[in-house]
Amino acid sequence: MVAVFDFTDFRKYLIAWIDEHGERGYGLKGRLAEAMRVSSSLVSQILKGEKALTPDQASDLCDFIGLNDIESEYLHLLVDLDRAGNPKFREKLKRKILHLQEQSKKIGKRVPRHKELTDEQKAIYYSSWLYTGIRNLTAVPGFQSPASIAEHLKLEPAVVHRVIHFLIENGLCKEVPGGVTYGPASLHVDKDSPFVNKHHQNWRFQSIQKMERRLDEDLFFTGPMSLSVAASDEIRSLLPNFIQSVMKIAGPSDSETTACLNIDWFKY
């Protein structure tokens, strides 16, 4: 995964980021131009070094890519360095750039192997199905790069970048050569948690959307019925055992695809 801290030239970073997402033509550059409110030709001139990037354009660029605060600050320093002509000011900027590079390394090392998310972090994690969805997807071969995930889920690269950054920062995913994969931290949302309803709703909504596909491999079961109290109690007692059986099968198996059981069953 291309990291801005690996570069001291914003153009080289931006070119690497575009290459990572596999779009050399108008597609991604056109969206970059739209995000920065400039023409596509100006984006090409900036990448070639014929034009400078303004601070306002850099801010829009950070938002489009999905950089966090420290990453955005670092990219702005690179833009300032590119524009600076005063030798003393350039040296000052270089020192700040080096400081942020070192700071970024320390942040990565502070992430514990096992950690409990704070309520604020849980609020983010359970705000969207994307966090659990993308995390599970990174365990599947072929989905270790943000570009492959974005293409598979039909998402903007900036959205995937923000989600992956959160997952890495909190030990839910980890960086590996060539991208990112499932992390060591484990999560469980208790039935009494204030986030449990949102977690269920996120995936129920995905289920409703997937119903439109009408694929044979998916399964959706809705069975309103009238029955005896005894039968109702017996069925209710069967479900936890069924869920436990499912988890015993899924848990030790190799990660080859992703799916969700509601009881609706669909791949995403």
Image (cartoon, helix red, strand yellow):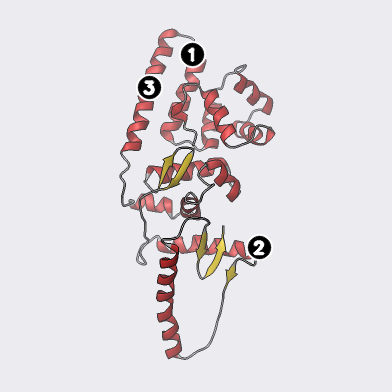
Whether label 2 touches label 3, CB < 8 Å? no
Secondary structure of the residue carrying numbered label 1: loop
Where does label 2 land, which residue?
Answer: 213
Tag count in the figure? Answer: 3
**254 versus 167 height, above or below:** below
Q: Residues within 10 Å of mark 1 (few under 14, many from 20)?
A: some
Where does label 3 land, which residue?
Answer: 98
Q: Nearer the viewer, residue 27 or 175?
A: 175
For badge 1, the amino acid type reads Ala
Q: Residues within 10 Å of mark 3 (few under 14, many from 20)?
A: some
Point out residue 236 in the picture as x, y percentages from the top left corner: 42, 80
**266 versus 162 height, above or below:** below
Disc 1 versus disc 2: nearer the observer: 2
For badge 2, the amino acid type reads Arg
Residue at 52% in and 30% down: 59
Secondary structure of the residue carrying numbered label 2: loop
Where does label 1 land, which residue?
Answer: 84
Point out residue 105 in the picture as x, y percentages from the top left corner: 35, 32
Q: Residues within 10 Å of mark 2 (few under 14, many from 20)?
A: few
Q: Give the alpha-carbon distance from disc 2 to disc 3, as whole Å.
A: 51 Å
**238 versus 206 height, above or below:** below
Q: Classify residue 112 by image quadrant.
A: top left
